[in-house]
Image: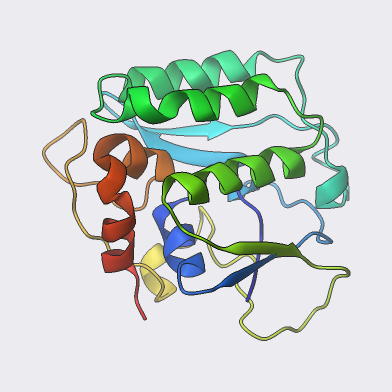
Amino acid sequence: MIIDLQYLPSLEYFACILQQEVITIEAHEYYEKQSYRNRCIIQTTNKIDSLSIPVQNGNKKVLIRDLRIEYHQDWIRRHWGAIHSAYGKSPFFEFYAEYFKNILDKKPDFLFDLNVELLSICLKLLRLEKKITFTEKYEKEVEFDFRGKIHPKRDFSLNGIYQPVAYRQNFGSEFVPNLSILDLLFCQGNQASKILHSSMIK
C-alpha cells in the first residue's frame, strides 16, 4: 500500500493504514495544493476549522520532500491557539498535548519531515506498531494505491475506507465524523485505537 503523507491526518487516513503492517509513504510526488498534505480539520466552539501550514513556492512544481515551510507567518501560534481552544478542556489533552507542541516548536525546515514526526507520534500514542517506509522513486501504477484518495474535496463515503463510529466530542449535539486524529486522541485517549478499529471498513 502506498499513501501520501498528511498533516495531523483524518480518521479515514488512520482507518486506511490500520489494515497494513507496513506503511509506504510516497516520497517522490509533487506537492499538491489544497490537499491534506499541509492541512488538518478540527472542531472548535461553533465551527469546523481548517488549519493550513504556509509553504514556500507552493505554486510551483516542487517535490514533496523539498517543500519548505514558511515561518514568516506565525502559523504555529495560530494553530496551537486553535487546538488549545478546541481541546484544552478535553479529558486527555494534558496527557498528549506536549508531544505535539514539542514537535511543532522544533520548526523543521521541510513539511515532509514535520509530517513524518507527527505521524510517528500519533502511531505511538495509538499504540499501533507499524513500520514506515518510503518510496525510492515515483511509480505511476502501483498495487493498493491510496495516493490522493483521502482529500478535502472528496467525500470519505466514496472511498469505502472509513465508517463513522460516534464518540463524545467537545462541542455540539451532533457527531462530526472524520476530523483530525487530534480530536479522537484528546477526546477519547486510550479508547482511540478501539474506536479506530471499529471505524475501519475491511
> Quadrant of residue 27 in the image?
bottom right
Q: Residue at x 25, y 20 (%)?
A: 89
Is 105 placed above or below 62 here? above
Q: Is residue 22 left or right of residue 88?
A: right
Name the one closer to the observer, 55 or 161: 161
Name, please, the residue furthest toward the left: 173
Q: Is residue 110 visible?
A: yes
Residue 10: percent from left, percent from top: 45, 51
> By what rule are the colours in the image chosen?
rainbow
Q: Is residue 167 left or right of residue 145?
A: left
Residue 130: percent from left, percent from top: 56, 63
Q: Residue at x 59, y 23 (%)?
A: 102
Name the one closer to the observer, 55 or 142: 142
Classify the position of the N terminus by image quarter. Answer: bottom right
Residue 31: percent from left, percent from top: 77, 51
Is 61 placed above or below 47 here? below
Classify the position of the C terminus by image quarter. Answer: bottom left
Q: Residue at x 57, y 40 (%)?
A: 39
Is 76 placed above or below 154 here? above
Name the one closer to the observer, 132 or 89: 132
**Tally of numbered tags:** 0
Q: Is residue 45 left or right of residue 58?
A: left
Q: Residue at x 15, y 44 (%)?
A: 174
Residue 85: percent from left, percent from top: 35, 17
Q: Is residue 180 visible?
A: no
